[in-house]
């Protein structure tokens, strides 16, 4: 029953995104490859450590357009809930084919709830983040909220494989006087479907398709990114 409800929820999100995209026929598009490397560490009974390293190859998979470093510390309230605080440094190419990059510094706070069902064969997680983005050329930080809902269904019969889906919405919470694209409202949406393979309890790879839609204010066109994303996940 839980799995059926989650599948229906994901299906509804896909339909909503299709309707949204259909109203922006002039949106530009790009094919990208993202490779997040996620390292989670249990430092003490409650203290958690996290590090993400992520290159993104854009401009139709021909140029390094983004590089991300995201460290964080977490505090486990219980087995399901964890509070997070962290920092991000992100380098974005000035244009898709450029080798010149602008730097974004970001502080962020988060809360995750992760639980299981169906004898731990079904895993679901809600991840919330509040971000304070300090971007080049902007005198004030851009405040953004993001929420991701992720589900993972393990394949029966003792297989190491799983099926994964997620939906994440980004919302700007304030207007930025220095950037017309950083105004309050929905900023982007990411919809993902893929498969995972767990080599050991500590190491998993997951790979799949991510559709990213970025809303932009006139006269700029919206951005549709078709992304092949491969996550390398390590837990210690």
Image (cartoon, rainbow, N blue to C red):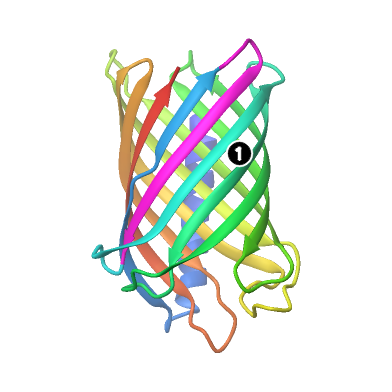
Q: Residue at x 39, y 78 (%)?
A: 28
**Residue ranking furthest to the top:** 45
Residue 25 percent coordinates (x, y) = 42, 81
Say few, some or many: other residues with alpha carbon within 10 Å of mark 1 (under 14 / 14 to 19 / 20 or more).
some
Residue 2 percent coordinates (x, y) = 54, 29
Q: Could you tell whether 94 is left or right of 157 in the image?
A: right
Q: Nearer the viewer, residue 115 or 41?
A: 41
| Magenta highlight: main SS | strand
Q: Nearer the viewer, residue 140 or 197?
A: 140
Q: Which residue is mark 1?
A: 127
Residue 45 highlighted magenta (yes or no): yes
Q: Quadrant of residue 29?
A: bottom left
Residue 136 percent coordinates (x, y) = 59, 69
Residue 166 highlighted magenta (yes or no): no
The answer to whether residue 24 is above or below residue 1 is: below
For the C terminus, the quadrant is: top left
Q: Residue at x 66, y 48 (%)?
A: 107
Q: Residue at x 27, y 18 (%)?
A: 159
The range drawn in magenta is: 43-58
**Residue ranking furthest to the bottom:** 219
**Residue ranking furthest to the left:** 62
Secondary structure, mark 1, is strand
Q: Residue at x 53, y 51 (%)?
A: 89
Q: Could you tell whether 18 is left or right of 97 in the image?
A: right
Q: Is residue 1 visible?
A: no
The answer to whether residue 235 is above or below residue 12 is: above
Residue 148 percent coordinates (x, y) = 57, 45
Q: Is residue 95 visible?
A: yes
């Amino acid at each position: 029953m839980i799995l059926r409800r989650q599948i229906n929820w994901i299906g509804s999100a896909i339909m909503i995104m299709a309707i949204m995209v259909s109203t922006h026929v002039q949106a530009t598009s790009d094919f990208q490859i993202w490779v997040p490397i996620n390292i989670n560490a249990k430092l003490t009974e409650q203290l958690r450590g996290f590090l993400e390293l992520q290159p993104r190859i854009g401009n139709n998979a021909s140029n390094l357009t983004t590089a991300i470093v995201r460290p964080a510390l977490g505090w486990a309230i219980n087995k399901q809930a964890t509070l997070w605080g962290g920092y991000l440094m992100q380098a974005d190419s000035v244009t898709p084919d450029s080798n010149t990059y602008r730097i974004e510094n970001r502080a962020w706070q988060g809360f995750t709830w992760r639980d299981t069902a169906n004898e731990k064969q079904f895993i679901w997680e809600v991840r919330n983040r509040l971000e304070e983005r300090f971007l080049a050329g902007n005198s004030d930080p851009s405040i953004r909220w993001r929420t991701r809902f992720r589900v993972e269904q393990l394949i029966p019969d003792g297989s190491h494989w799983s099926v994964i889906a997620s939906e994440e919405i980004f919302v700007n919470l304030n207007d930025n006087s220095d950037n017309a694209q950083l105004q309050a409202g929905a900023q982007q949406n990411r919809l993902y479907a893929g498969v995972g393979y767990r080599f050991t309890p500590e190491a998993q790879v997951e790979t799949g398709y991510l559709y990213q839609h970025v809303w932009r204010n006139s006269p700029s066109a919206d951005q549709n990114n078709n992304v092949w994303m491969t996550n390398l996940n390590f837990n210690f």
